[in-house]
Image (cartoon, rainbow, N blue to C red):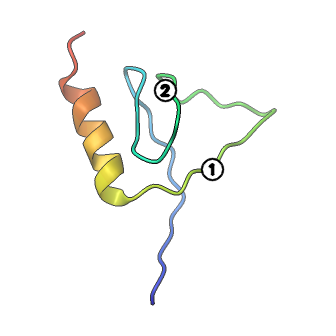
């Protein structure tokens, strides 16, 4: 089994839900030097969340 990983900062315009994360994630991507969170997310789940964010009403 091959595992691939990458590190990426993603910014959302609206609060977002991503499959596998049990809470609403805040909008934006401000740097927080006091805490870091890492999530294991499937590429399809991330793409779905980004698509929903892009099409959400302002």
Q: Residue 17 occupies which quadrant of the picture? A: top left
Local secondary structure at mark 2 = loop
Where residue 21 appears, as percent x and y from the top left, is 50, 42
Residue position for label 2:
24
From what the image shows, is residue 3 above or below residue 45?
Answer: below
Q: Residue at x 24, y 9 (%)?
A: 58
Q: Residue furthest bottom?
A: 1
Q: Residue at x 43, y 22 (%)?
A: 15
Q: Is residue 30 left or right of residue 16?
A: right
- Assign the N terminus to one quadrant of the image: bottom left
Residue position for label 1:
38
Query: In front of the other: label 2 or label 1?
Result: 2
Q: Is residue 53 left or right of residue 34?
A: left
Judge by depth and name the residue closer to the eye, 11 or 19. 19
Where residue 24 appears, as percent x and y from the top left, is 49, 26
Q: Residue at x 37, y 22 (%)?
A: 13
Badge number at residue 55: none
Q: Could you tell me how far apart the alpha carbons at marks 2 and 1 are, in whole angstroms?
A: 15 Å
For label 1, the crowd category at 10 Å Cα-Cα, with few meaning under 14, some 14 to 19 and many 20 or more, is few
Where residue 32 appears, as percent x and y from the top left, is 71, 30
Q: Earlier in the sequence, mark 2 or mark 1?
A: 2
Judge by depth and name the residue closer to the eye, 38 or 30. 38
């Amino acid at each position: 089994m091959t595992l691939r990983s990458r590190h990426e900062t993603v910014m959302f315009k609206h609060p977002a839900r991503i499959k596998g994360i049990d809470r609403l994630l805040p909008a934006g991507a401000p740097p927080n030097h006091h805490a870091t969170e890492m999530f294991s997310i499937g590429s399809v789940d991330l793409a779905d969340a980004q698509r929903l964010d892009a099409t959400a009403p302002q």
